[in-house]
Image (spheres, grey):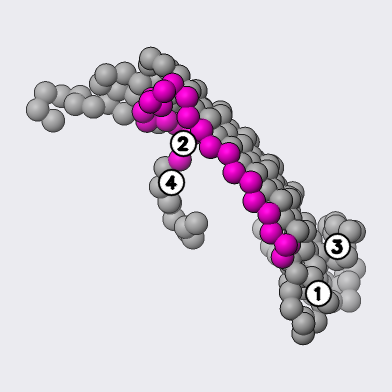
Amino acid sequence: GAMGGVINVVDRRLPQSAPVNGLEGEIGLRANSGAREKAGAFWLTGGRGPLLLHVGGQASDAGDYRVGQGWSGGSRVDGSQRRSKTGSLGLTWLGEQATLGAAVTRQTARYGLPGHVHNDCHLHGLHLQCDDGHGHDEDGHAHHDHDHDEAHGHVPVVDLRSTRYDLQGEWRKPLPGV
């Protein structure tokens, strides 16, 4: 990914050409033992004539990462678990001189934030306020107003929900000689 910038990613959500036989796709499965991960993904694009339909999705589920000996937290990194699901649907019109496509993608994810030092930092208006490690902020007031995933001790968990909309068009040779 790009940090602090824009990255141009070309994917299959908005097909740029018709499948040779009217239909194409892929399916993939993955597993690993380090985090007891299970994952799968698929995409399918179909259509004849000017309209193409694309569907795709993925799901993954992984537990806490397994680490070697000497890790102070035991044999697994507490809070490194993650679970995600993504689905997308796209429709593209292919004309002789132009194309126009639209897609929507929905993503949900839940993952831990390992290595979290519990200083109980939270926003108060536009200011970040942190306690002193004993439940008191810089002014001596007691605070504790956010949740932790009880299954993973005191590790915070991100619960992400995102919907992305894409619109892409192209007009070839809009002016003679260009």
Percent across and percent down for residue 19 are 41, 26
Q: Main secondary structure of the magenta part?
A: loop
Q: Is mark 2 on a helix, strand or loop?
A: loop
Q: Three-letter amino acid code at disc 3?
A: His
Residue 120 appears at what percent x and percent y?
80, 67
Instruction: Tell me the amino acid under the disc marked 1.
Output: Ser
Q: Residue 144 carries which label?
A: none
User: Does residue 92 appear in this view?
Assistant: yes
Q: Nearer the viewer, mark 3 or mark 1?
A: 1
* Circle 1 SS class: loop
Measuring 53% from the left and 37% from the top, which residue is drawn there?
Answer: 26
Please state the extent of the stretch shown in magenta in the rendering. Answer: 11-35
Q: Does the magenta stretch include residue 26?
A: yes
The Cα–Cα distance between marks 1 and 2, rounded to whole angstroms, is 39 Å
Residue linked to disc 1: 75
Read off the residue under disc 4. 9
Circle nearer the N terminus (3, 1): 1
Q: Where is residue 18 in the image (x, y as percent from the top left)?
A: 38, 25
> Circle 3 is placed at which residue position?
152
Is 19 left, or right, of 111 in this rendering?
Answer: left
**Circle 2 residue:** 12
User: In terms of depth relative to the viewer, which is nearer, 126 or 45?
Assistant: 45
Q: Viewer-nearest of labels 4 and 2? A: 2
Instruction: Give the crowd class for mark 1: few <14, some 14-19, many >=20 residues within 10 Å.
Output: some
